[in-house]
Image (cartoon, rainbow, N blue to C red):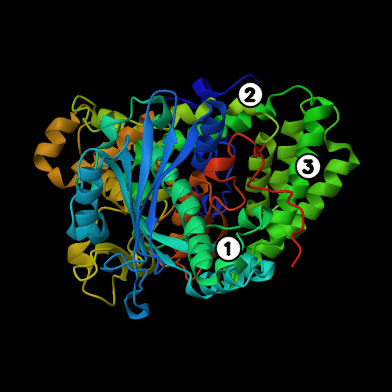
Amino acid sequence: MKLDQLSPDRVALRPPETVMRLARMGSFHQSRLSFMRVLLRRLKSEKWRFERRAFEIDARGVGHAVYTMHGPVRSYSLVAFAHDLPPEQRSDRVIATAWDATFTLFDGLPSDADIDRLARNVPLQEAGRVTSTELTVSRANRSVRLFDHVLDCLSRGEQPDPAQVDAVGYLMRTTAVYGSGKLGAADRESICDRPEFAAPFQAEMLTVFLIRGFVLDLVEHLAQNRGGSRAVPVDPALRRRFGIGNSTGLGMAPFLLNHPILLNNWIAARETALARVRALPVIAPGDAEAFRTMLRRGRRNIDEWHSEHPIQCGKIAELKTDLDRLDAHVESGALVGALPWDRLYRWAETALSLEGQELLVALMMEPYGALVDDLPMRMSADETAGFRIEGGMTVARLREILEHDYAWALGIDWGRPEAQARAWYVSAEKLEPRLGERHLEPVAAYEQPLAPGRDAALLFEALKGEDADTRVADLLLRLPEHRHILRRVQIAARHPYAEIRDNTVGADVLPIDLLRAKLSFFGACHFDPRSDRWVRINMFRNAPFPHELAEIEFAGWTYPDLPEVPS
């Protein structure tokens, strides 16, 4: 796949050397292509119907519920189990053994026998097993302070404090949403030919979307049991300001490195969308006004973005300045004339920070659903197709690829301790990916192959003295330790955005950049890093609920223009 083959009209895609740097990827924002938004557009356009088939929850908040979405061909049911969890057992760690709620997404309509089987397994999570009729397995814990505040207010007939709602943003946070065969669930291959799951992570996004509805129903149910006739539900406008939280750490960080073809397809779709918009010769008045509206909403969204992490605090402050500058530039006539979007983006390259540039990329897509909304269907990948090594490739061709696609890695002095300060490994105790200090901890022997830059440089060094006509199949018979990186190099030659062009084991690597990039494609916003290794996010905040899909216009729900809710 060559960049000029992807380029629409007159505007080339941004080169990998620009896009695939961790600092820029760690500045990505959600967009029309993000998986949450892809899901909700489909649910609405195809008129999916919501049904609460069961809600067998007692006054203590213990029991089960079944929430079903009926589509044109198939139905999917969230089976939720609510538990009475003692505070001392509440933990966000992957290795926890108890949760406030556990879930599975069932393929179809579960029978009573299915519910009984799931009740014996889903609450156990890793200690249980599900079957191919289950598509995902998940669990969540309460945000105790806000959950108790909301429950207390509703039971007394009062609305929760909007300031407290906005400060936390969710009543529960998921600690895992497993799919793709985890714990016995259905493999991705068994459902990928269904149109509703053609885009990536749609089963997982549907799971979280239904979990959000269940959690709000649960707190209102508990308030009704506590307060009786005094109790009230959450005001609909305030209700939509609750999302589902998530704490994401190093466990997710290796994903983009381990799925290079998938990463390429995500980035290529995003870059194609940007190039299509930049290639538009003029802006219609309605599109210009739509952009201005989303710019205002985006500014309000940023004003509500808070973090205590010093790096993110600085980026938010810089982004606010960027938006002031962008707004002034737009009002000065930047959207008038030939190729206005292209000119606006080129101006941003020097006028705005990376955060500002990447937010502009997302905002530019907003008026142009008809132009870009087909692209998520290209974002999945059959990664087995790239696994086979082309053994007939010559050493001469391999050198050319390394010199072109890995020039950034060949320019690093890998002998410097700072260049290999870190090592990725899997903790035996926690069963989670970890990033250790190579020169201070005995972790090198357990290192995972997550340093493609270094390994590419080692492969290049190994090619010295090899005949140009030598086949890589013969090379690997003598040097099998280079098999994994040679495969990556061949993948990168066919997929320009497959490789992150930065050192992933250097002293200055920030794993939160990897997390931010992936989560932006999910549709998360308001990233709140708690260190350089884990981040809190909020999912589906301000979105409609399942029962509201038919009535509410929500194209711009991520940047909402909600009325103020009286306190």
Question: Can you tell which mark lies on residue 244?
Answer: none
Nearer the observer, disc 1 or disc 3?
A: 1
N-term mark: 1 or 3: 1
N-term mark: 2 or 1: 1
- Tell me how far mark 1 sits from mark 3, CA to CA: 24 Å
The image shows a total of numbered marks equal to: 3
- Tell me the kind of residue under disc 3: Thr
Determine the residue located farthest toward the front in the rendered image.
229
Q: Secondary structure at mark 3?
A: helix
Which residue position is annotated with label 1?
Answer: 169
Determine the residue located farthest toward the left in the rendered image.
477
Give the image location of residue 306, x and y in percent. 63, 67
Q: Dot 3: within a 10 Å radius of its alpha carbon, few (fewer than 14), some, or many (20 or more) residues?
A: some
Give the image location of residue 486, x and y in percent. 25, 39
Residue 98 appears in the picture as rendered:
yes
Compare residues 307 and 461 and report the one nearer the observer. Answer: 307
Compare residues 212 and 511 and report the one nearer the observer. Answer: 212
